[in-house]
Amino acid sequence: MATRIEFSQHGGPDVLKAVEFTPHDPAADEVQVENKAIGINYIDTYIRSGLYPPPMLPSGLGTEAAGVVSKVGSDVTHLKAGDRVVYAQSGAGAYSSVHNVPADKTAKLPDAISFEQAAASFLKGLTVYYLLRKTYEVKPNDVFLFHAAAGGVGLIACQWAKALGAKLIGTVGSAEKAERAKQAGAWQVINYREENIVERVKEITGGKKVAVVYDSVGKDTWEASLDCLQRQGLMVSFGNASGPVTGVNLGILNQKGSLYVTRPSLNGYITTREELEEACNELFPLIASGVIKVDVAQNQKFALKDAARAHETLESRSTQGSSLLIP
Ligand code: NDP
């Protein structure tokens, strides 16, 4: 028997229940993975709450984990039983001790990367990869704004930006988070509970403002983010931690300086196995060499059955960096 987290109605963390189940064999294009560490992502809370409803209820949850291949579908040639792997974009169900995953969404894990490091950094690292390398190609000395800089995605972004020689201005919600983002390589940090984001960005940049803003907070920061942009700047709105941005009058882009907006997602950038391999070839060496560190604090590692508590903690805004479920 295996254990997985399910929910049969949308709502708060308490809708998440641990259930026992008998795993079925993987389909021809899938592998079965015994999960050793499971990544918790903010998107999991959107699926649970109903902001991004799953195809049907009851549903599993989670799209990212690292573990060992236990069974291989008949059409899969690049993976075998016993391989150490990590996957993201798996479809709901990674919050489980065992999960059948499309082989094309699964990457072999270098020995130098532990299961916990992998589960803490794969989906989030792939996200930072496409944001900083594809959506807007960040160059040395580029100055840009990145919200939630001490979060899971944020701390990876701080370190990746530093590795690129770029100057990331991060926003955070506490003094402790400011310190953590700084240590991770943020060039400047704005604690928005004490400082006005737009005023500080103007001050830091000597009035020039920035060419790109990466905004995963959504509703609460939309307007301030636009006000931090130079003429023809790019607003990358990639998340909804405070709620989705809706009802936008496009005229605002004209008023604020002929701005561009994009609303990207991982699936729009990494779809094929070739695209995944290209991304892994950039991400894995950064993790394996310690240029990007993704150590997870002990109080952000939760037993699988405590998924509800893990969600409560993530949504309370008290976490720094990534959080994990351990089966
Ligand atoms: P985080 O660890 O970053 O947690 C979210 C953080 O957002 C909080 O810690 C908090 O930091 C900040 N925040 C600001 N306002 C709120 C609010 N009203 N409620 C809750 N949190 C708030 O999560 P992840 O690293 O998992 O994800 C970060 C973001 O990136 C999410 O919005 C997620 O949806 C998005 N994302 C998008 C992807 C894509 O491809 N489009 C892929 C992966 C992630 P603080 O206290 O410092 O403000």
Image (spheres, rainbow, N blue to C red):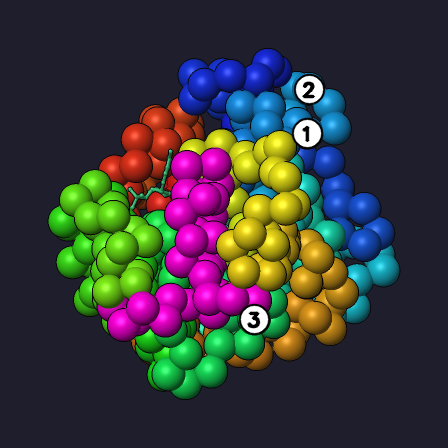
Q: Which residue is mark 3?
A: 136
Circle nearer the viewer, 2 or 3: 3
Residue span colored magenta: 204-232
Quarter of image, res 145: bottom left
Q: For this view, does 5 lie left or right of residue 182? A: right
239 to 115, vertically: above or below: above
> Which label number is shown at residue 231?
none
Question: Type of residue at label 3?
Answer: Tyr
Q: For the residue carrying disc 3, how many other residues have a C-alpha within 10 Å: few (<14), some (14-19), or many (20+)?
A: some
Density class for disc 1 (Cα within 10 Å; few <14, some 14-19, many ≥20) is some
Of the 4 image quadrants, the one containing the C terminus is top left
Q: Which residue is mark 1?
A: 54
User: Answer yes or no: do the residues labelled 2 and 1 have beta carbons within 8 Å?
Assistant: yes
Q: Residue at x 25, y 58 (%)?
A: 200
Quadrant observed for ligand 1 in the rendered image? top left
Please tell me which residue is depicted at 41% across the width and 78% down the height of the picture. 142
Q: Residue at x 60, y 61 (%)?
A: 258
Residue 277 in percent (x, y) is at 65, 73
Is the residue under label 3 in contact with that under label 1 (CB below 8 Å)? Answer: no
> According to the image, label 2 marks what residue?
57
Number of disc labels: 3
Against 255, residue 111 (above or below) is below
The quadrant in which the N terminus is found is top right
Residue at 33% in and 75% down: 167
The mark lying in front, picked from 2 and 1, is 1
Residue 10 sits above or below residue 322 on the image: above
Q: Is residue 219 left or right of residue 209?
A: right
